[in-house]
Image (cartoon, helix red, strand yellow):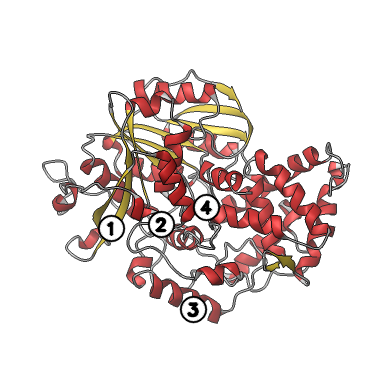
Amino acid sequence: MMRSTFARVLVCVTAASLVMPLVACSPAAPDKPSPSPSGTPAGLESFYNQKLAWEKCDDYATNETESKVFALSGALECTRMNVPLNYDDAAGRTIQIAVMRKPARGQAIGSLVLNPGGPGGSGLFAAAASSATLATSPLTERFQLVSFDPRGVGASVPAIDCYSDDENDRGAVKLSAQGTTLQLTEQDTREIFDRCAKGSGGAEMLTHVGTRDTARDMDVLRAVLGDEKLSFLGQSYGTRLGAVYAEQFPQNVRAMLLDGAIDPQQGTVQRRASAYAGFQGAFDRMAAFCATQESCPLGGDPAKATQEFQKIVRPLYATPVPALGVELRFDDAVGGVIAGLYTKEAWPRIINGLTQLQQGRGDELLQLSRDFSGRDAKGAWTNFAEANFAINCMDEERLSEQEGGRLRTETFRDAPFMDPGVDVSTGAREGCEHWPAKPTLGYPYADNVEGLPNTLVVSITGDPTTPHAGGISLAKTLGSALLTVQGEGHTIVLAGTNPCVLQIAADYLINLKLPAEGATCTG
C-alpha cells in the first residue's frame, strides 16, 4: 500500500496495496503517442482543444470529510474533462476526469499539477488540503494549484465501485495485495471481477485504469489548462505516474518533483517485500518510542516488542474482538497499525489501540484503518481501496497462488510483526486473475528517457513504505537531483511543515534551480 501525506491528513485529523526478483516477463512499454504537426497526438485534437467549464466544487465531494475540507479551503473551482476510455480507439467511448484548481495568490507562472499517491488517492482532496498546508508558500503565490481524480477514482466518472459502504463496514471486502492472511478461492476472484465490472462501468473500464492511460490523461490536462509544459509534483504512487509521464512525454515536462519514490527498477514482488520490511523498521522505531512511555503495551524492551505484539494480536486470527459495532480481526489490527506507521504523529494512536486491545476491544485500531481509507463519520467510504486494487491490476505483475504463498512466507520473515502464527501459504490467489487484459505498465519503466529536463527526487531516510533506496534508484533512472531528508515519515513536501524542504522545492519548481549535489534536510 503506497500512500502519501494524503494518508497523514486522514489519520491525524480524525480521532488515506503494497506498494523478490521478477517472477514473470513484463510487457514491453507501449510506443509513445505520435504527435500531429501541431504537437497534439494525432486523432486526439478534440480532446486537447476542449474548453473546460469551471464551477463550484460542492457536488464533487464523495463524502462528508471531503466536503468539509473543500469548504475550509475556499475559492476552489472544479470541472470534468473528457478523455477517451481507450486511446487506441479515440472515436469510441469517453469518460470524465474530475479536476480542481485553486487560483494563485499572486502573479502565476502556470499550473502546478499534483498527485497525492495511492494509487487511488483523490487528487481533489489533495489539492484542497494542500492549498491550506501551503497557504503562505511561494508555491501557492506563483502557481495555480491543480489536481485531478485519476480515471476510476473519486469524482471521476465512472468510478471503481465493487462493494457497498455496509460491506466495507462489516469487513466483507475481499480485495487483497497477497501480503495479508486473506485466503481466496477461484470463485472468490471471479466474484471480485464480476462485482467490480458491474459497479464500475463494465469490463472495458477495468482494463483502462492503469498508469499509462492516466499519464496520457495528464497530458490532455496540461494542454487544456493552457500550459505549454507540465510542472508536476507527485507523491508516493505519484512518483510512478510522474516517471511514466516523463517516459511518454519528456518534451512536455517543465519541472517534475517526485516525493517518496517508488523504485522503477523493482518488480512487484521485490517492491512489496521491501515495503513490508520497511514497515517492520517503522514498527521497531515505534516500539522504541513506546518503551519510553509509562505502561507501554509492548513492554520496556524494544528487542522483545515484536513478540509482545504477537501475543496481543495473534489471538484475533481465531477470535475477533468487538470494535465500533462490528469485529476487529487479525488483518484489521495489522492494517490499523500499518496505517499509523506512515507518520510518527500517529504512533500514540497505535499504542492506545494496543492497550485497548489488551482490554478486549479494537475500536482505536479499526478507526485508524478506517481513517486511512477515508471513511467519514456518517459511514460513507471513498473508493480508495477499490480504485487502488483495480489500478494495480493493470500495473502490477500477476502472481500465481504459489508465488503469492512464497511472498507471504518472505513477508512474515522480513516483517514478523505481521505473522499470524498459522500457515496461510495456501489461498494466496491473485485477486485480478479474471481481469480480461494483461497489465500494461511493464518493469522496469522510465529507463533511458531522452530529452527530459532537470528533475528533482525527494526521499526520507526513515520512509516506512517507499524506502530511501528507491529514491536513490529513481533519481539514477531519470538522471534527477536528489534531496535526502533525514527523518521519519512518508512524503514531506505538501505537508508544508519543513522550511528547508519547502525552500528547495520552491527554488526548483519556480526558478528551476536544483539543490547542490548531496543536499540534505532534517525532518
Whether label 4 touches label 3, CB < 8 Å: no
**Quadrant assignment for the C terminus:** top right
According to the picture, the residue beneath numbered tag 4 turns out to be 267
Label 1 crowd (10 A; few <14 / some 14-19 / many >=20): many
Label 3 crowd (10 A; few <14 / some 14-19 / many >=20): some
What kind of element bears circle 3?
Answer: helix
According to the picture, the residue beneath numbered tag 3 turns out to be 190
Query: Residue 482 location, x and y as percent?
Result: 50, 28
Q: In which quarter of the image is residue 196?
A: bottom left
Report how far apart the C-alphas of labels 4 and 3 lie in the structure: 25 Å
Report how far apart the C-alphas of labels 1 and 4 lie in the structure: 31 Å
Report how far apart the C-alphas of labels 2 and 3 lie in the structure: 24 Å
Is any part of residue 21 visible from this angle?
Answer: no
Q: Could you tell which of marks 1 and 4 lies nearer the N-terminus?
A: 1
- Looking at the picture, does residue 259 appear above or below residue 522? below
What kind of element bears circle 1?
Answer: strand
Q: Could you tell which of marks 4 and 3 lies nearer the N-terminus?
A: 3
Q: Which amino acid does label 2 sit on?
A: Gly
Query: Residue 51 location, x and y as percent?
Result: 17, 47
- Looking at the picture, does residue 408 appear above or below residue 192? above
Report how far apart the C-alphas of labels 1 and 2 lie in the structure: 11 Å
Is any part of residue 260 visible from this angle?
Answer: yes
Q: What residue type is labelled 4?
A: Gly
Q: Which amino acid does label 3 sit on?
A: Arg
> Which residue sits at x=45%, y=35%?
132
Query: Residue 297 location, x and y as percent?
Result: 84, 49
Task: Say which of marks 4 and 3 sits in front.
Answer: 3
Report how far apart the C-alphas of labels 1 and 3 lie in the structure: 28 Å
Q: Could you tell which of marks 1 and 2 lies nearer the N-terminus?
A: 1
Query: Residue 176 location, x and y as percent?
Result: 57, 65
According to the picture, the residue beneath numbered tag 1 turns out to be 96
